[in-house]
Image: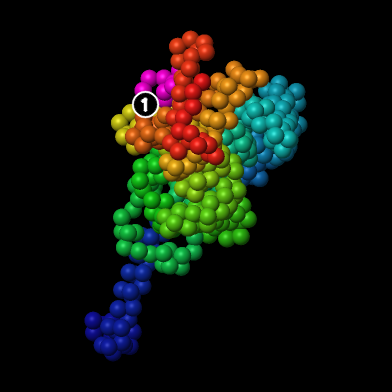
Amino acid sequence: METLMKFWGLDLVALRGFLFSIFILNFVFSCQILFLQPLVAALDGQPSGAAALFERASQSIKVKKYSEALDDLNAAIEADPGLSDAYWHRASILRRFCRYEESEKSYKKFLEMKPKNSAAEKELSQLFQAQSALDSAKSLFDSGEFTKALEFIDKVVLVFSPACSNAKLLKVRLLLSAKDYSSAISETGYILKEDEDNLEALLLRGRAYYYLADHDVAIRCVLKNIYDFLLLTFTSPYHAQPHPKARKCNKNKMENRRSNDLFMSYLFEGLSFSYILYLHIFFLRHYQKGLRLDPEHSELKKAYFGLKNLLKKTKSAEDNASKGKLRLAVEEYKTALALDPDHTAYNVHLHLGLCKVLVKLGRGKEAVTSCSGALEIDEELIEALVQRGEAKLLVEDWEGAVADLKSAAEKSPQDMNIREALMRAERSLKLSQRKDYYKILGISKTAPMSEIKRAYKKLALQWHPDKNADNRAEAEAKFQEIAAAYEILGDEEKRTKYDMGEDIDEGMGMGGGGFNPFGGGGQGQQYTFHFEGGFPGGGFGGFQF
């Protein structure tokens, strides 16, 4: 140490500082070697030549990593513009993605290097066919020929260009137009698996769930991450329990069946629509992705706010109905139905709700129309059958009411409320088929006994056969009706049974033979009719024929 100090002319403190500096420099250098070695090794492994790039692209193609392969092929062509096989593979990959113009240029470049190559000429011909098929499908879609357009997509475009996102999205639109919502959900699932940020796929997937009446999933797929302050605004203790459907957006196994069954069960098995609305608000936080990626996306915004308006109108209608504000409820239901007439899976609920309110208001004719609208969508909807039966009773369509309620009772034989309604309808039908004795006597159903007697005396005198010699047959028939009516209505006990629809005796209730003052053969027999107090204006208590 002393020798070093004398040699360098340093004191002890300076020497210690010098040695410490050497140690630090050595440590830093060692760290650099340690951390840079993997990077250097990686850089050494990067292919630098066209052949190496082409080889790596070939390996990527084998494992279907087409985007990575395309990058390497572009780099290989840049390094060696004469590498013909690179043009061939690049053209094939571009064709898969339906980038037809770029693919055509690569095929033509390959043919320049290898003229009259039959495989390339065939590929180029098929490329033109696929491009033409895609253009035709778009035109057919615009003109409303959805089935033909779908054939072009499935049988030509996606066969030749299986990774064509434009064709896949067009196919989803065609499926939506054909109302094949479950297939549309499956197709968008495949697209989102490859590109989870695809806005159009999110929109179309949400629309498919919407028309399946699975609104909470629809909102999640359309908006998927809306602004954070909305979540804070609607936070509640219930958020701690996630809904079992919260992870459904990007799954496609039996989605349509589960989602529709769950939502319809909410509607028709007692879960209030107010809670369904709450679930929609809760799921807003699952929607933010679409609008965060593009807050001004017009179709996404339209879908979201359209659904929100529909739910708002429906909730308002149901709230008014529950509060007894029936006329307001009718208007809200009608407004909600007008928002999206094609949304049949949801409108069945609105038609039914409107029908029930109209029945309560006694507006039978309108109620029949509303319930029929629900049954046109779902003919197995028992509650709609029951409500339509009640509505038909209001318009005195007795046979129609019995038919609807009998059908409902067959579908739900254990429901005593339906059976009671059916019995009422059958009794009303039976009453409608017998003679209306009140009408025969020309009195109201609430007429007192004194009025019944006066009406009977007046009509009996008017239609007595001896006073109607010119039309004796008609008079006899009328007189029989008048006498039969008085026999029932003139007796308090019989009148009560008649009013309740009970059978009084055989043939009497249904307008059969009944009471006949000309009993027997009716050939000139004499009958005496007694009128208490005599006929009006007369001084005798009876007279004889």
Q: Which residue is nearer to you in this view: 198 or 529?
A: 529
Q: Position of residue 379 (x, y in %)?
A: 48, 31
Residue pictured at 75% horizontal, 26% vertical: 115
In the image, residue 509 lies in the stretch drawn in magenta: yes
Q: For mark 1, what is the residue? A: 503
Residue pictured at 37% horizontal, 67% vertical: 29
In the image, residue 275 lies in the stretch drawn in magenta: no
Q: Position of residue 533 (x, y in %)?
A: 45, 38
Picture layout, residue 177 above or below residue 219? above
Q: Quadrant of the N terminus?
A: bottom left
- What residue range appears in magenta? 505-515
Q: Position of residue 452 (x, y in %)?
A: 47, 38
Q: Amino acid at mark 1?
A: Asp
Question: Left or right: 469 with respect to 408?
Answer: right
Q: Position of residue 16 (x, y in %)?
A: 27, 83
How busy is the neighbourhood of tag 1: few (under 14 within 10 Å), some, or many (20 plus)?
few
Q: Which residue is nearer to you in this view: 121 or 412?
A: 412
Q: Residue furthest left?
A: 1
Q: Which residue is nearer to you in this view: 506 or 217?
A: 506
Give the SS element for disc 1: loop
